Amino acid sequence: MRIALATGDGKFVSRHFGNTPYFVIAETDGKKWTFIEKRDNSPACSKDGHSQEMFNESAKLIGDCSVVVCSRIGDFAQNGLRAKNIQPLEKPGFIEDILDEYVQYLARNEPKKERNNHPCFDTAAHGQYGRIHLPVSAKCNIKCRFCERSINANEMCPGVSMTVLTPEQAVKTLAEALELCPELTVAGIAGPGDALADNSAIETFRLVDKHFPQLSKCLSTNGLGLPDKVRELSALGLKHITVTVNAVDPKIGEKIVSHITLNSETITGEKAAEILLSRQLEGIRLAAESGMELKVNTVLVPGVNNGHIGEIAKIISAFGVKYHNIMPLIPRGEFAGTSAPACAMLETARKDANAFLPVFRNCAHCRADACGIPGVSDFSRKLYEKTGDFRCNNVCG
């Protein structure tokens, strides 16, 4: 990985991205760093404002870098750099100290060699340990064009559950699940909406922590609400989070997400995709800094983001993500007429991602009410199914 540092003297990061005379380029393997070279830069900012042409030249100059460190950087440059898959960071200080600190950050977030007992974060654990998805989160704060949330017993895909439970019902269900499957080690929440669209998940985790402290807690989220909830989740002892990131280019993102709802405002188009991406990356960064283990799910949509997977992996790798899971599209919603990706396309996408991050290959498109050892047992019907009567305690809206 290469890092560009904006400087005026070669020793100290003291320059705004738009007025730095040159960049120092360093390279790291995650354990140590070395200086590569100095590159002269023509500043993009002047008394007359921003020059798009000069910004493009500056971005091209550091195009082989994953990260650029500046003393300050404005929204214009941040958005432009992210669109070019370069992560901007604001951190003035001595260059050597910054590089030492960044290498330590990478080392802290390097995937652990030892096994853990989370079947969705460790391939070796996948067929031995169990997990339960507690379907307490009915609401969602974004609308993905491929998503159709529903209450039914038949479809095998995310966003589907036989019921929606209250937090109190979820804890009772968890007690029943442990009797059916003593191998359960993880209590997770993955819908059928978004786990952070309201407080249902957090209230459930509080009860799980009280009654079943031996279980690990995890959640899946689209990331829109993650920055606001990280501190609360960390205080509850949450160790694993999966964030779905389908694009790191808002122009691609708007083809996948039709709108978001933030602070009671519905936002559409490229602006919605840009806000979603910004909050996803900020939430991931904060979660990684708090010590959580992070996986990113990406839905592979043929003709939309299939050539974009490597860029997603490159960006998220700089934020502390440990695993990347590429999920083939299930043709639904607005993408009902789109064919699922062929095996060759899926394998190419996984190869592109693997250049930056370990790829998790055991995902089975689990429902929001899954229970059991993945690939071995499934107790969801015994827990949730009611003959001809599926119950929903919240409005799935």
Image (cartoon, rainbow, N blue to C red):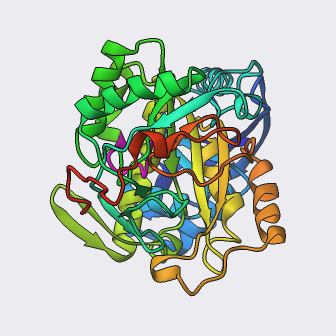
Going by the picture, which residue comes out furthest to the left? 264
Q: Is residue 217 above or below residue 325?
A: above
Q: Residue 8 or 243: which is nearer the viewer? A: 243
Q: Is residue 228 above or below residue 47?
A: above
Q: Image check: 141 left or right of 325?
A: left
Tell me what residue is drawn at x 60 percent, y 20 percent.
Answer: 97
Considering the image in quadrants, where does the C terminus appear?
Answer: bottom left
Q: Residue 83 or 217: which is nearer the viewer? A: 217
Tell me what residue is drawn at x 34 percent, y 62 percent.
Answer: 142
Visible residue check, residue 116: yes
Magenta region, residue range: 220-226
Tell me what residue is drawn at x 36 percent, y 42 percent.
Answer: 226
- Report x, y in % for residue 215: 48, 18
Considering the image in quadrants, where does the N terminus appear?
Answer: top right
- Report x, y in % for residue 335: 52, 80
The part of the image, by quadrant, that contains residue 319 is top right
Q: Residue 146 lies in magenta, yes or no?
A: no
Q: Is residue 197 above or below residue 143?
A: above
Q: Residue 221 lies in magenta, yes or no?
A: yes
Visible residue check, residue 6: no
Tell me what residue is drawn at x 57 percent, y 87 percent.
Answer: 337
- Report x, y in % for residue 106: 65, 28
Q: Image check: 140 left or right of 273?
A: left
- Report x, y in % for residue 184: 55, 25
Q: Residue 39 or 388: which is nearer the viewer? A: 388
Q: Is residue 166 above or below residue 296?
A: above
